[in-house]
Amino acid sequence: MTPLTEALERAVDLLARAGVPDARVDAELLVGHVLGLSRGSVQAKVVMGASLGPDDAVALAALVQRRAAREPLQHITGRAAFRALELSVGPGVFVPRPETESVAQLAIDALRAVASPEPVGVDLGTGSGAIALAMATEVPQARIFGVEVSPQAYPWTRQNFREHGGDNARAVFVDLAHALPELDGTVDVVASNPPYIPLGAIPRDPEVRLHDPELALYGGTDGLDVVHHVSATAMRLLRPGGFLVIEHGDEQAASVGALLAADGWSAVAHHRDLTGRDRATSALRP
């Protein structure tokens, strides 16, 4: 038997030396994954002086080595937290980030403000389904559609919609540029976290650079190729007065705002994330 505190400290040290941010958090989450416990329960076990059995110690060591090689924690555990959801993720699908939770909040607030008893929301480029399923679960009277075109991501989309979607959420496999013509002029809210990294900007973090799918990262020379399509599709889908919100890089607010204004959107506004960076832009359909 290995004292849990000893195994945990060994994991923290290895992850920290590999440059993993928040090494202790990840180590505790990996222990929790092996033992089937929450992070808080792992901390309690440490205080109580618990030990790891031989099989669990071997399993933990293998997972720590994978994380030290900078494989995303979410790929190792197969789960990613997003607001109140625990989503299934893995190779081929973009791992949802905390900053996208504020984008989902803007969409949720807009849905809740709709006078209709059954507002309609669309998530263009839904990936894991994070924004769409947040809307569907937090505004249960709404009808939500999540659009995804990647054949590698869509199995994760379907799995998460099966786990969390209920009767009010539907996943659709289609290019967002041609999505949902049957809903033209009837949608209340469109949200999107499109690929927006310029082709020349290589992400610093190896978890992103080596493991997130390129289709979900790169948006052409200036990063805005897909944003143009999102703007056009949202203009087609939304009713007059309908709400659009797009996530983007923190240096792209002005260019996204100019793009939307040129496309005829009104009330263009920028929104900051929890770190104070402009990470989303919203607009209303005239």
Image: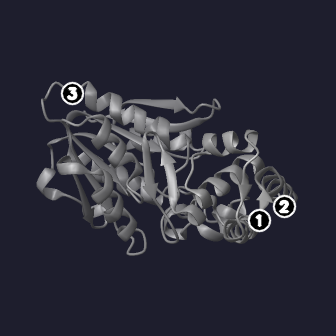
Indicate the quadrant where residue 52 lies. Answer: bottom right
Q: CA–CA distance between discs 1 and 3?
A: 47 Å
Mark 1 crowdedness (10 Å alpha carbons): few <14, some 14-19, many ≥20: many
156 relative to 283, above or below: below
Dot 2 alpha-carbon crowd within 10 angstroms: few under 14, some 14 to 19, many 20 or more: some
Q: Closer to the N terminus: mark 3 or mark 2? A: 2
- Across and down, in percent, residue 129 comes to 37, 54
**Image location of residue 140, percent across then percent down:** 23, 37
**Marks 2 and 1 close (CB-CB < 8 Å):** yes
Left or right of residue 73, residue 85 in this image:
left
Q: Disc 2 residue type?
A: Leu
Q: Amino acid at mark 3?
A: Val
Q: Secondary structure at mark 3?
A: loop
Can the viewer see residue 21? Answer: no
Residue 200, image x and y in percent? 67, 64
Q: Nearer the viewer, residue 224 or 261?
A: 224
Q: Which residue is depicted at the point 73% across and 59% down?
A: 204
Task: Name above or below for residue 170 compared with residue 185.
Answer: below
Alpha carbon distance from label 3 to label 2 = 51 Å
Q: Secondary structure at mark 1?
A: helix
Q: Is residue 100 left or right of residue 157?
A: right
Residue tagged 3: 114
Task: Give whichever of discs 1 and 3 has the lower sequence position.
Answer: 1
Q: Secondary structure at mark 2?
A: helix
Residue at point 50% right, 31% down? 270
Residue at label 1? 68
- The residue closer to the viewer here, 149 or 51, is 51
Callout 1, which amino acid?
Ala
Q: Provide the residue designation for mark 2.
A: 14
Q: Which colour style is shown? A: one colour
